């Protein structure tokens, strides 16, 4: 989601907000979710997220860059097996981790 957001020139949290389930939506298996809490959750964390972004930018130096990550998990989001998650870090000689 973060890579796609970057390519779209969007904030990663806002891309997640736009794509959150809403009443009438169905999951990959064709079922409607039992609850639609993602938009309310994102609305609740948005101020803390924005403050964390500002703090990371303020504390970043050429030697030590700071970042903010967002992850969303959902149990029973499909009938296709075990869910998983991955974290990717890129390191550039001139810029460090991004």
Image (spheres, rainbow, N blue to C red):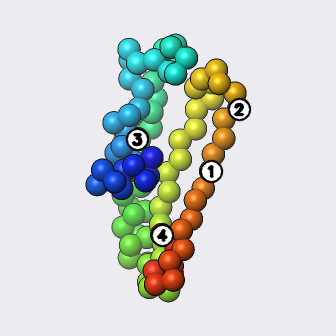
Q: Earlier in the sequence, mark 2 or mark 4?
A: 2
Q: Is residue 21 above or below residue 16?
A: above
Task: Please indicate whether residue 34 sits to the left or right of residue 25 in the image.
Answer: right
- The residue drawn where x is 69% and y is 27% is 81
Q: CA distance from mark 2 to mark 1?
A: 13 Å
Counting from the top left corner in percent of width and height, residue 11 is at 34, 52
Q: Nearer the viewer, mark 3 or mark 4?
A: 4
Find out whether the residues at labels 1 and 3 contact each other: C-beta distance under 8 Å.
no
Q: Is residue 35 above or below residue 57?
A: above
Figure quadrant of residue 38: top left
- The residue drawn where x is 36% and y is 43% is 15
Q: CA distance from mark 2 to mark 4?
A: 29 Å
- Determine the secondary structure under disc 2: loop
Q: Count residues near mark 2 (Cα–Cα under 10 Å), then give few for <14, some for 14-19, many for 20+.
A: few
Per the rendering, the mark at residue 98 is 4
- Determine the secondary structure under disc 3: helix
Q: CA distance from mark 3 to mark 4?
A: 20 Å
- Determine the secondary structure under disc 1: loop
Per the rendering, the mark at residue 86 is 1
Q: CA distance from mark 1 to mark 3?
A: 17 Å
Find out whether the residues at labels 2 and 3 contact each other: C-beta distance under 8 Å.
no
Q: Is residue 70 above or below residue 54?
A: above
Which residue bears the numbered disc 3?
Answer: 16
Figure quadrant of residue 60: bottom left
Q: Earlier in the sequence, mark 2 or mark 3?
A: 3
Q: Earlier in the sequence, mark 3 or mark 4?
A: 3
Counting from the top left corner in percent of width and height, residue 75 is at 63, 29
Q: Nearer the viewer, mark 1 or mark 3?
A: 1
Which residue bears the numbered disc 2?
Answer: 82
């Amino acid at each position: 989601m973060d890579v796609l957001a970057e390519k779209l020139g969007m904030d990663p949290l806002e891309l997640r907000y736009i794509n959150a389930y809403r009443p009438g939506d169905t999951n990959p298996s064709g079922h409607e979710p039992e609850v639609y809490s993602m938009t309310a959750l994102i609305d609740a964390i948005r101020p803390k997220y924005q403050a964390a972004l500002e703090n990371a930018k303020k504390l970043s130096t050429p030697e030590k860059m700071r970042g903010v990550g967002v992850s969303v998990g959902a149990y029973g989001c499909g009938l296709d097996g075990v869910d998983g998650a991955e974290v990717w870090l890129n390191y550039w000689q001139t810029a460090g981790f991004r």
